[in-house]
Amino acid sequence: MLKKVLIVDDSALMRRLLSDIIEEDEQLTVADTARNGLNAIELIMMGKKYDIVLLDLQMPKMDGITFLKELRKTKASIPVLVVSSIAGETGKETIEALELGAFDFVRKPSERVGEAYMMFRHELLMRVYCACGLKEDTAEHKPIDRLKLKQKEQEIHRRPVGNAPKPRIRKGDKLVVIASSTGGPKALQSVVPVFPAGFPYPIVVVQHMPVGFTASLASRLDELSPLHVKEAEDGELLKKGYVYIAQGGKQCELIQKEAGKYVFSENDKPARGGLRPCADIFFESLVHTSFEEVICGVLTGMGADGSKGIQTVKTCKKVKVVAQNEETCVVYGMPRAAKLLGVVDDMVPLDHVASMMMRKV
């Protein structure tokens, strides 16, 4: 049976674009479209059934945030995928939408043809499939063989770990790293604020997000947390008392300048597996630092990012890994991959992740 999609956007052009993408897929159909949140709520209140809602945020009469609040009141259990731009305040609005229960978000394409459009189409359908419980590996929408692409990117872009000199380990020098993707912005609110003021080690969060959104995520987490939370900046010195969010649309790495001194490299290295930032790349950069121990948290998310990077760090450092359990994940992808690779020490519910990580310190 086809999965029914409700498209909510005030732009007729965007409604047509999304409709064309959905109708081209063999397992999806556009059941209805709405020009704003009010129209969409009316359809739902009429008893219409949908498997997923594609939601714009900035609309007249009822915007996307108000729609999500009203949807909660209906008790309807419908996954919502935000299809958002990054203009104006949309970054903050997107974070708020995720807090209100949106499944995930996709950034609107800057053009209607070419590579940017194809990437948007792929990301949109991949998330719709995941939200609707469809098997992505049977989908017709994949524009490329992603397994071959990932293998090729790893061969080209992976740092020559075996050939590089390894720095002397500094006893007591530790780093906390959290990797997350789909469902991560909301999950991080149950993890980051738990770390107390005075926590003795820096924390780095690699959350899959495009450019323009991680600053808003950092700002929101900073409001909730005893520690300072900020977006990492290129060349910035890593300091304790801070939680750093890797920049969206960049690769984040740590570079050692001298004993115990590390700076961020927020760079334009190619995406790996379509990801920038990529947790695997960040973990690999730690091989060339003098940290004695790395404490890792693996939270909800599609795919397997982080697992192989953690495995690489384990070859030369003490590594302890806490992963979010299946029952509390929005998408049990990244934790599952880490578990299958055998790098997880403890798998716990979301609200136990931070406390378990602190026990590892």
Image: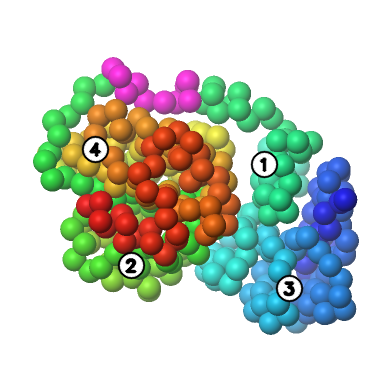
Q: Identify whether 75 is placed above or below 188.
A: below
Mark 2 or 1, which is nearer the eye? Answer: 2
Does residue 348 appear to the left or right of 23 in the view shown? left
**Crowdedness of circle 3 by 10 Å Cα count: few (<14), some, many (20+)?**
few
Residue assigned mark 3: 76
Mark 3 and mark 2: Cα distance apart in space:
31 Å
Q: Residue at x 55, y 35 (%)?
A: 273
Mark 4 and mark 3: Cα distance apart in space:
46 Å
User: Could you say which is closer to the camera, residue 205 or residue 16?
Assistant: 205
Q: Amino acid at mark 1?
A: Met
- Residue 306 quadrant: top left
Instruction: Please check the rendered image and state whether residue 156 is part of the magenta-colored stretch, yes or no.
Output: yes
Residue 320: where, in percent of width, then height? 30, 44
Image marks 3 and 1: residues in contact by CB distance under 8 Å: no
Mark 1 and mark 4: Cα distance apart in space:
38 Å
Mark 4 and mark 2: Cα distance apart in space:
23 Å
Q: Amino acid at mark 2?
A: Val
Considering the numbered disc 1 on the image, is that residue within a helix, a strand or a loop? Answer: helix
**Crowdedness of circle 4 by 10 Å Cα count: few (<14), some, many (20+)?**
few
Q: Which residues are magenta?
A: 154-163
